[in-house]
Image: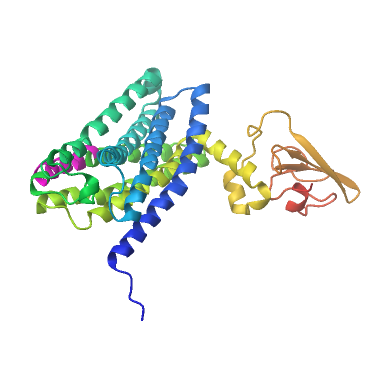
Amino acid sequence: GRAPPCPLQHSRALYLSIYLLTILTGFPTNLLALHALIRKLRCKATPNCILLLNLTLSDLCFLAFLPFKVAEARAGRWPLPAFLCPLSGLFYFSTIYSSTLFLTAVSVERYLAAAYPIRYKLRRRPAYAALASLGLWFCSLAHCSIVYVTELQPGGGPANGTSASSKGVCYDDFTPSQLQVLLPVRLELGIVLFLVPSLLTSFCYCGFVWVVVSSPHIRRGKKQRAVGLVAATLAVFIVCFTPYNVSHVVGFVQRASPSWRDKALLLSTFNASLDPVIFYFSSSAVQHSCRRFLARLWGICSLPPLARKVFYRRTEKLTPGPPQEQCRGLGGGQVCCSKLTPGFYPWCWGPVGWSMGLGPGRARAGAVGVRAGGTEPLGDTLIHSA
């Protein structure tokens, strides 16, 4: 019989699958978020928008260096020039921790805006958010420069006359002298750049949700968005960042890198795919871009009713200009539909209908129209007729 694949082959397949999945899902969603946030910044710069923009850039930078990991996993060794090893490691690890810092900054901004709305609004300046972003970038890059320090230790690379290519590994298989420097720094990274930000994020979002949910003046939709934002952020911290940073503590106690550290690090790559979910709940500009993109890509016909309810609202802000109309004779009368985007007719009206407070004879998409002389829905065929 055929021999089963060795564990190394299984490991390579796992790494390649997760890396490619992250690239395929992370790049388009983060580029869409980047486009939306830049458009919003041109109209009106806000601290939240600046922080989200930096978080998006962090994810895109991470994704830009992820193909190096794909090449390493595919070859089973480091196949690229030696100088790219510490460079890719620096950006790979620093963008992981910059994501935690920017997620924490967003949570602090949300909490201050909800808990102290008047005082915070008086002191709210986009320049402060820009300066804070520069400080967070410097903090993550400075801490993760340990990659270069480790590579220059004896047996770590150029200082010993070897390279990542000749050793066959990149930032792995450390010598005792390297671990003596690396393990305490990893512990410090886990405390300063993960534990403290995660505790601060949890505190801020607990207070934020309490203020939003307990307020009788906030609409139910905004309350649901707030809960979704908190759930998505905490999921990123728990799933993507916690296992990897726990490995720092275990490694420091055992005085050696845990055998499962690489698997824990692999989970952190999902951060680039999950952050766009946070963007969706955090920014109305990203929400509008998602709806606009889906409307142009598929049109309302191809979406099931549940997705249509989530991604489309009663709004004419999706496209500028006056709405177009398309009418069809039906049952002795005429029923017309307004067109906001190609293939998108969200409003219909006729001689007889129901209003829901929206004006005589109007109905939402999904209950898209009313037959003349009755209340039977017309269905999607009328809305999307050519």
Region rendered in magenta: 179-193
- Spot occupied by residue 251 in the image (x, y as percentages of width and height): 14, 51
Check if residue 321 falls in the magenta segment.
no
Check if residue 187 falls in the magenta segment.
yes
Query: Foreground: 72 or 45?
Result: 72
Query: Based on the displayed image, in which of its 4 quarters is residue 1 positioned?
Result: bottom left
Query: Foreground: 215 or 220?
Result: 220
Query: Based on the displayed image, in which of its 4 quarters is residue 60 positioned?
Result: top left
- At 28% across and 56% down in the image, what residue appears? 263
Left or right: 169 as drawn, with respect to 372 = left
Residue situated furthest right in the rendering:
332
Left or right: 288 as drawn, with respect to 234 = right
- Spot occupied by residue 119 in the image (x, y as percentages of width and height): 36, 21
The answer, for residue 148, to whether it is visible in the render is yes
- Spot occupied by residue 107 in the image (x, y as percentages of width and height): 35, 35
Q: Is residue 304 above or below residue 42?
A: below
- Spot occupied by residue 115 in the image (x, y as percentages of width and height): 36, 30
